[in-house]
């Protein structure tokens, strides 16, 4: 496991804390355009992911990349997470990873 460049777990609200840094987020794909994907974060905020994923995309994807703005990520890695995903539990994970248990996450 490479720990030299960790990616913070984020939802839509937490993304603004990490502008210019590496993040990971799971989004529900709303639509895919040339060079970007529009999605809904696990806390129901709109996120724009820049880049070109390999099709086909599933309903839920994880992106790892650099937070460019409070609602934009420039993706480096795209991972399909399937068409069924527990967004509520992932959202709680994001809160824990950025709260009192932050020290447990790289």
Image (cartoon, grey):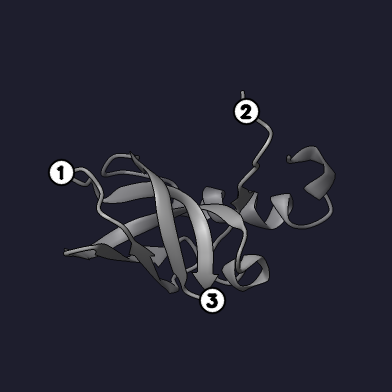
Q: Looking at the picture, does residue 69 appear above or below residue 36?
A: below
Of the pair 67 and 97, the residue shown nearer to us: 67
Q: Position of residue 80 (x, y in %)?
A: 31, 40
Q: Position of residue 73 (x, y in %)?
A: 45, 63
* Left or right of residue 103, residue 27 in this image: left
Q: CA distance from mark 1 to mark 3?
A: 27 Å
Residue designated by label 2 = 2
Q: Position of residue 88 (x, y in %)?
A: 51, 55
CB within 8 Å, label 3 to label 2: no
Which residue: 60% across, 51% down? 9
Which residue: 26% across, 44% down? 83
Q: How busy is the neighbourhood of tag 1: few (under 14 within 10 Å), some, or many (20 plus)? A: few
Of the pair 60 and 19, the residue shown nearer to us: 19
Q: How busy is the neighbourhood of tag 3: few (under 14 within 10 Å), some, or many (20 plus)? A: some
Which comes sooner in the sequence, label 1 or label 2?
A: 2
Image quadrant holding the C terminus, namely top right
Q: Looking at the picture, does residue 59 appear above or below residue 12?
A: above
Q: CA distance from mark 1 to mark 2?
A: 27 Å
Which residue: 64% across, 41% down? 5
Which comes sooner in the sequence, label 1 or label 3?
A: 1
- Which type of secondary structure does the marked residue at label 2 adopt? loop
Q: How busy is the neighbourhood of tag 2: few (under 14 within 10 Å), some, or many (20 plus)? A: few
Which is in the foreground here, disc 3 or disc 2?
2
- Which type of secondary structure does the marked residue at label 1 adopt? loop
Image quadrant holding the N terminus, namely top right
Q: Dividing the picture into quarters, in which one does residue 33 lie?
A: bottom left
Residue designated by label 1 = 56
Of the pair 52 and 45, the residue shown nearer to us: 52
- Which type of secondary structure does the marked residue at label 3 adopt? loop
Residue designated by label 3 = 70
* Left or right of residue 76, residue 1 in this image: right
């Amino acid at each position: 496991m490479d720990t030299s460049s960790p990616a913070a777990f984020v939802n839509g609200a937490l993304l603004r804390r990490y502008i210019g840094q590496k993040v990971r987020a799971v989004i529900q794909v709303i639509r895919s355009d040339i060079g970007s994907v529009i999605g809904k974060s696990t806390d129901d905020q709109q996120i724009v992911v820049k880049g070109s994923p390999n099709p086909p995309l599933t309903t839920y994807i994880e992106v790892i990349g650099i937070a460019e703005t409070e609602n934009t990520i420039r993706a480096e890695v795209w991972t399909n997470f399937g068409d069924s995903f527990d967004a509520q539990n992932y959202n709680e994970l994001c809160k824990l990873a950025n709260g009192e248990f932050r020290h447990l996450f790289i």
